[in-house]
Image (spheres, helix red, strand yellow):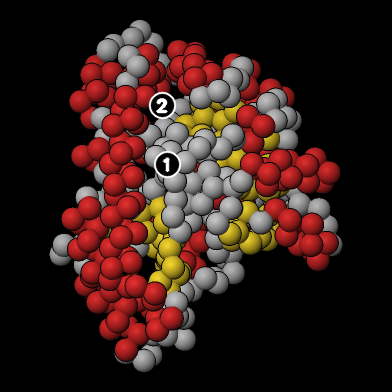
Amino acid sequence: MTRLLAPPRSDRELVGSLIDSSTALLAAQTHDVVRFAMGAPSEDLMPIAELDEAFATARRGRYDYGDSAGEPRLREQILRLAAEAGAPTRDERVLVTTGGMQGLDLAFKLCLDPGDLVIVEAPTYTNGHATALSYGAEVLGAPTDADGLVVDALPGLVERAGRLPRAIYTIPTFQNPTGVTMSRERRVRLLELAERWGALVIEDDPYGMLRFDGDPAPSLAQIAPDHPLVFQVRTFSKTIAPGLRVGWIDVDPELRERAVAAKQAMDTCTGVPVQHGVAAFLEAGRLRPHVDRLLPLYRERKDAMRRELDRVFGDRVVATDPEGGFFLWLTFTGELGGLDTEALFPDALAEGVAYIPGPAFTVDGSMRDALRLCFATSSPERIAEGVERLARAAERTAGGGAGGVR
Ligand SMILES: Cc1ncc(COP(=O)(O)O)c(C=O)c1O
């Protein structure tokens, strides 16, 4: 029989997102579930009234096709934000994207040929490495510790791979999934290596503005302003609301021109009414006060989660201690050492708590005894309840033999 359609691309290339699938899974649950899984601000902390007000301010042309680079009024606000953050940039470097995800898609689309090597952090943001895979990358995980990516491990990895990476994908500040932040020294060293190898450094920074403790870490783009190899990906998803689907990239102007062309072939422009809504929100000076209101709450929630983990699990877990962002990373140790977090998941869900298992964040399915917890979405009381449920499920799975402790 004649084939009328081209064959689909292989499953290996088009990997979906376990994180996104869990949104649907969680929505289907009818019992009470403490949600530590998704990395989104909870609705009660979104600036909904202010957004509604911003969206209500009508503007001519807001229902037309827009400039593929983004609405000028929003780009102006993005430049203002960057300057306020001490990382001034220029209009010819900025392109408004449909969320941070489109920034990542553009980064990999523009720099990769099938078979190219991409270095990612292990663990890393699932949708980031899935995007690299969708462009045919060979993805190599590099170790991380409490100071982020272990940059000194990269030359050895590259030597063993026998070829240079085309891109290094990193989330240096309040990393997803671990919450850790890369030290300044490592950032500088990473830029040196990228220059030596001619590799694009994709700096994915959705959480940088959400620091509730410690001293600010300069972004890679700040350490090396105008560097042609630094591709910065930003989003308003975590600071305002993810459903807006508005982000931006800050890149070399030549690369930005190519990104504009690529975006024209994807979605022409990011939704124009939404860009105007976000611009009006920013023009009214709403973002900084909103974030300032959130930060003490996030600190309180992170502290509550670490305190409850310590109280309920004691030395049976180790957890990271982030200074910002949404997540902490938990690894089972001691009596619970080796507990398989994928096997634990159905028990945990039945018990009424959800998280994302460690292997979702690795290219090779490793880190089975670890999991990601989002502390940002739940109140301290719900966090206490969720951690207790997690402990009951862990004890049951560990005691149950099959599928439990390896
Ligand atoms: C590290 C990282 N990069 C990118 C994104 C995607 O951002 P957006 O929802 O704006 O597409 C996320 C969202 O979870 C993220 O955590």
For the residue pair 215 and 384, the one nearer the viewer reads as: 215
Between the C-alphas of marks 1 and 2, the distance is: 35 Å
Residue at horizontal 71 percent and vertical 40 percent from the top: 188
Q: Nearer the viewer, residue 268 or 95?
A: 95
- Residue beneath the point at 32% across and 21% down: 286
- Is residue 309 depicted above or below 70 in this figure? below
Asked whether mark 1 and ligand 1 are closer than 8 Å, the reply comes as no
Image coordinates of residue 27 in percent, x first then y, are 24, 56
Which quarter of the figure has residue 152?
Answer: bottom right
- As drawn, is 404 to the left or to the right of 130? left
Density class for disc 2 (Cα within 10 Å; few <14, some 14-19, many ≥20) is many
Quarter of the image that includes the N terminus? bottom right
Residue 271: mark: 2
- Residue 109 quadrant: top right
Please state the horizontal and vertical placement of residue 5, each as a whole percent of the image.
Answer: 56, 55
At label 2, which amino acid type do we have?
Answer: Gly
Left or right, residue 366 beside residue 254: left
Q: Secondary structure at mark 2?
A: loop
Tell me the residue at 43%/74% (across/down): 332
User: SS class of the residue under badge 1?
Assistant: loop
Disc 1: which residue? 213
Residue 240 lies, in percent from the top left, at 35, 32
Front residue of 249/184: it is: 184
Classify 394 as above or below 136: below
**The residue under label 1 is which amino acid type?**
Asp
